[in-house]
Image (cartoon, grey):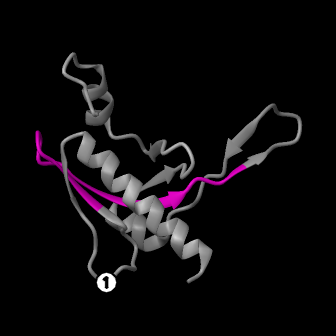
């Protein structure tokens, strides 16, 4: 199996766990390929989010300090469907979704925020 496919599967699994911790219902396409890797439905609002998981790639930029995230472009189909990209750092398990999902940001601010 190609290492890129392995990284992709790990990224999707970490992303699924991320959404579950924020009380989302998580669905993954049966076919295993396509413009969407994860469908997340909020258990609080019913909002549905279509997500494409990407293993976070970083590079050093000339004249800047530290490593910077490599942003990916959506395909025409993904743009049409309203897909968001989730950058998943496999080593740290950090997830960054673009554009952000406001209800996750709001949930982090509540007193009841606990994901362990």
Residue 83 at least partly seen: no
Q: Which of the 4 quarters of the picture holds residue 16? A: bottom left
**Residue 28 x, y percent position in the rendering:** 28, 68
Q: Which residue is mark 1?
A: 31
- The residue positioned 61% from the left and 52% from the top of the image is 71
Magenta stretch prevailing secondary structure: strand
For the C terminus, give its image quadrant: top left
> Horizontal placement of 74 versus 4: left or right?
left
> Horizontal placement of 45 versus 86: left or right?
left
> Horizontal placement of 33 versus 89: left or right?
left
- The residue positioned 70% from the left and 42% from the top of the image is 68
- The residue positioned 48% from the left and 45% from the top of the image is 93
Q: Residue furthest top?
A: 111
The reply to whether the magenta stretch includes residue 51 is yes
- The residue positioned 19% from the left and 21% from the top of the image is 112
Q: Residue furthest front?
A: 116
Q: Is residue 32 above or below residue 87?
A: below
Local crowd size for mark 1, using a 10 Å CA cut-off: few (<14), some (14–19), many (≥20): few
The reply to whether the magenta stretch includes residue 26 is no
Q: Secondary structure at mark 1?
A: loop
**Residue 97 x, y percent position in the rendering:** 43, 46
For the N terminus, give its image quadrant: bottom right
**Residue 96 x, y percent position in the rendering:** 47, 43
Residue 107 at least partly seen: yes
**Residue 103 x, y percent position in the rendering:** 25, 34
Number of marks drawn: 1
> Horizontal placement of 14 versus 7: left or right?
left
Q: Which residues are magenta?
A: 39-58
Q: Is residue 4 above or below residue 69?
A: below
């Amino acid at each position: 199996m190609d290492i890129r496919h392995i990284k992709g599967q790990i990224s999707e699994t970490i992303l699924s766990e991320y959404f579950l911790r924020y009380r989302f219902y998580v669905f993954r396409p049966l076919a295993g390929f396509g413009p969407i890797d994860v469908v997340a439905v909020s258990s609080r609002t019913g909002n549905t989010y279509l997500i494409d998981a990407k293993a976070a790639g970083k590079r050093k930029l000339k004249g800047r300090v530290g490593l910077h995230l490599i942003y990916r472009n959506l395909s025409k189909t993904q743009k049409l469907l309203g897909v968001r990209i989730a950058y998943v750092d496999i080593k740290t398990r950090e997830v960054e979704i673009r554009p952000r999902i406001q209800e996750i940001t709001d949930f982090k601010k509540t007193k009841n925020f606990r994901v362990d």
